[in-house]
Image: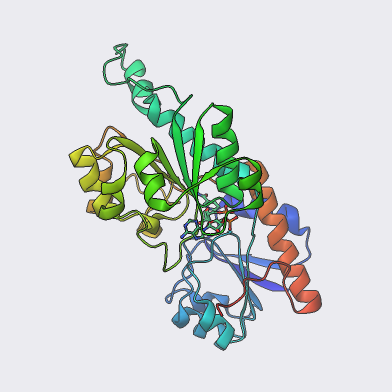
Amino acid sequence: MQVVVFSTKPYDRQFLDAANVGRHQLRYVEARLSPETALLAQGAEAVCAFVNDQAPAEVLEVLAGLGIRLLALRSAGFNNVDLTAARRLGIQVARVPAYSPAAVAEHTVALILGLNRRIHRAYNRVREGNFALDGLLGFDLKGRRVGIIGTGRIGVAVARIMQGFGCRVLAHDPWPSAEGLALGLDYVALGALLAQADIVTLHCPLTPQTRHLIDAAALARMKRGAMLVNTSRGALVDTRAVIEGLKSGAIGLLGLDVYEEESELFFEDLSGQVLQDDVFARLLTFPNVLITAHQGFFTTEALTAIAETTIGNLTAFAGTGRALHEVPAPG
Ligand code: NAI
């Protein structure tokens, strides 16, 4: 099958080629999928896209016009696709439902540990010959309360690790998972979790219901000085409200692997350019904020699994007309 792969980086190519072993004709393009680039899919039957590729109705209409019948996402999340429009246009949407929950969970814990012990600041200080400890004071994780919002594959993996540190894990999820219950997680209402947790970490998907789940009202309910971590999707958090929370001290520590407007920034080397996003620039000024550029998924194991499942989706679609991991349209 002819497939156009959008947002290709050298590592995507390496892992997809290894998984494909010549089965499909993969045409790699570096551009992100957008209304301006959708025509690059001309001549293909399927399009392969990643987290910051955009597939609203207007893009899907162009793809359908080109005869594209499958949109194979290399991600678990699918908030960037208009599923209703895809169904109307006869484009099947497939994804990689679980590629390595451990990869994202371990990165979440890296942010928690790094922030708590100020590793980002200590690293720079030591390199400058500054061996003072002022400002690096952390706390023992043992005995602390960690609040996990969304206890699916990744949330449960985070819970398991934090239990290993001796934390008490609170959880909020409208649909508590069997694994979460088996781990003995303390399922509570969102308000109770926010009020009690020393660390709040987000692992629910981005949907219309969860957009700005952490807004000014939610921040006001959090323990003063608590840590907030988001490795799920940027728009779960109202960034402007979080900035106010950091300024007032309501939030003590903030760890982000995702950002509301990340599609304009992440995955690119912009170090030689003037940063145009003033909100992001403000975030970078806080000493108690640690940001990574959506690298939770970036492990050998996860990239191998993403590539293998994606090729599996393409192969199944080519053979039977149905991808292995189809995303159903709403309703
Ligand atoms: P999952 O589908 O296994 O779990 C999501 C959980 O969130 C489910 O248990 C669901 O019931 C729950 N949930 C839904 N609405 C909720 C709400 N309003 N409040 C609380 N919980 C709610 O998904 P998985 O694999 O654990 O991934 C979670 C998210 O992590 C994905 O949606 C994706 O956005 C993000 N992700 C980030 C990556 C990164 O590189 N930083 C990589 C992979 C995923």
Q: Position of residue 309 (x, y in %)?
A: 71, 59
Determine if residue 34 is in view.
yes
Q: Nearer the viewer, residue 323 or 230?
A: 230
Q: Position of residue 115 (x, y in %)?
A: 39, 31
Where's the C terminus, which quadrant? bottom right
Q: Position of residue 13 (x, y in %)?
A: 63, 55
Q: Residue at x 55, y 47 (%)?
A: 155
Where's the N terminus, which quadrant? bottom right
Q: Residue at x 42, y 66 (%)?
A: 209
Determine if residue 255 is in view.
no
Q: Position of residue 330 (x, y in %)?
A: 55, 77
How many badges with numbers are in the image? 0
Quick check: 30 left or right of 119? right
Q: Indicate whether 53 appears above or below 247.
A: below
Q: Nearer the viewer, residue 276 or 285?
A: 285
Which residue is farthest left? Answer: 248
Q: Quadrant of residue 211?
A: bottom left
Q: Nearer the viewer, residue 224 or 212?
A: 224
Quick check: 163 left or right of 305? left
Q: Nearer the viewer, residue 79 or 197?
A: 197
Q: Indicate whether 296 appears above or below 32.
A: above
Q: Indicate whether 2 appears above or below 274.
A: below
Q: How is the image coloured?
A: rainbow
Which residue is farthest right? Answer: 319
